[in-house]
Amino acid sequence: MKRRNSILFISFLLYSISFAETDHWYGWLGENKTGYVNDFIPPKKWPQSLTQKWSISIGSGYGTPILKDNEIFTHTRKNDQEYIACVNKESGKIKWSKMYEAPFKMGGGGEKHGKGPKASPVYSDGTLYTFGISGILSAWNTEDGEKLWSKSPGLSFGQPYAHWGVSNSPLVINNKLISLFGNDQKGALIALDKDSGDTLWTLPCGGTCYSSPTIGTIGGILQVVVLHHESLIGVDPHSGELLWEFPFPHKTHNQNMPTPVVHQGKVLFGGENRGVYCIEPKLKNGNWTLHKPWIQKDVALNMASPLISNHLLFGLSHYGLGRLFCINPKTGKILWQGPPRTAQNAMFLSFRDHVLALTNNGNVKIYLNSENAFQIVANYKVSDTQTWAPPVLLKQGLLIKNSQNLTLWNF
């Protein structure tokens, strides 16, 4: 009897622990920048529609919501001020909010996209880091919204932002906050101490663009991979040493916007009108060499960053007015393409056997991460206005930020 009671107690304890686990989302594409949501279990039968739990007006901007336990943190814009808010996940009520002056004049051709902010914030050890569209980088205490420090490292290059404003989301590695700073002509990859904001190292490079730094292991070495205005580079995150460089200049309308993907020692990336590339940096006798296993020119990446799921590369080509695609990352072969005129942009996540694409026209498309065909299993309308901010997939639903509102949808 005692043994049975012990088993029952242990079972109850394990159940309680698993049930008490909370959702968290610390930055765009998650903690490891893979976009994979490990703890979401797809339903046996997808519902016909989603249930709106709450929706609040939170301001404009493209930054992903950040989630820690029961608190959501957002970075948006209200008129000429950028706005940071802490929202209760259960009620949708604002716990605290802060604002600071951030006037901005959008570069020609980008007016319809608004004045941001466009970079996604990132959370680490009780601090929220925000990177405003005009180049203001700030650290906020998530308990009460106290500003811990704020600076504009890009000012040393003159204008502290590219033509359409800051869009690259910072990366946290241990005690370092790493991002591109500067403008289209001049810039640097800079690592700051995340607690003090002090500069730890600076790597001068081409001007900034709209792609974000990512991280991966290549040749057995952990490195930051960055696409800037002129090149794709691999950098030692500890010292700031440039390891290798692949020229890929941003010219005329061929912008460098998508964030690269590191997969099995290779880098998969692309740019507007230039297709999708695979390069393989290799280290031998202390020297790096670059190999190009393949280039696929029948699809191209404009603003949407691709994603690896089930060892397949998924993305949105801007050809055909927006077509979802699947590529074999080993060979570069296109395995399938979805219908044309899908969307201008898509933000991707993945989970068990599935890919989720949030398109800029307010649709969530969930399809199998299969090489055989484009097989949609669920399609939901989550907004009647533009949705450019990356979504957050929770155990029971979705956080969606559209042009003005933050909404919690339940499955």
Image: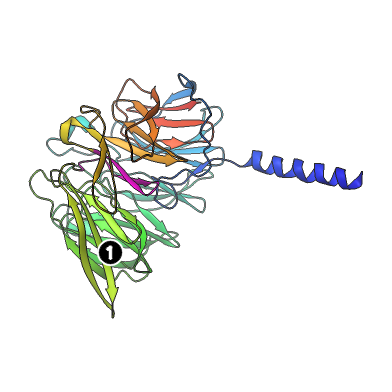
> How many marks do you count on the picture?
1
Give the percent coordinates (x, y) of residue 252.
7, 46
Q: Is residue 69 left or right of residue 155?
A: right
The N terminus, quarter of image = top right
**Front position in the image: 372 or 36:** 372
Residue 153 appears in the figure? no
**Front position in the image: 272 or 132:** 272
Determine which quarter of the picture holds residue 143: top right
Amino acid tagged 1: Gly
Q: Which residues are the magenta region?
A: 301-316
Residue assigned mark 1: 234
Residue 330 appears in the figure? yes
Q: Residue at x 25, y 49 (%)?
A: 211
Give the percent coordinates (x, y) of residue 67.
49, 41
Is the residue 84 above or below the residue 231 in the image?
A: above
Residue at the farthest front position: 372
Determine which quarter of the picture holds residue 156: bottom left
Determine which quarter of the picture holds residue 163: top left
Q: Is residue 243 magenta?
A: no
> Which type of secondary structure does the marked residue at label 1 adopt?
strand
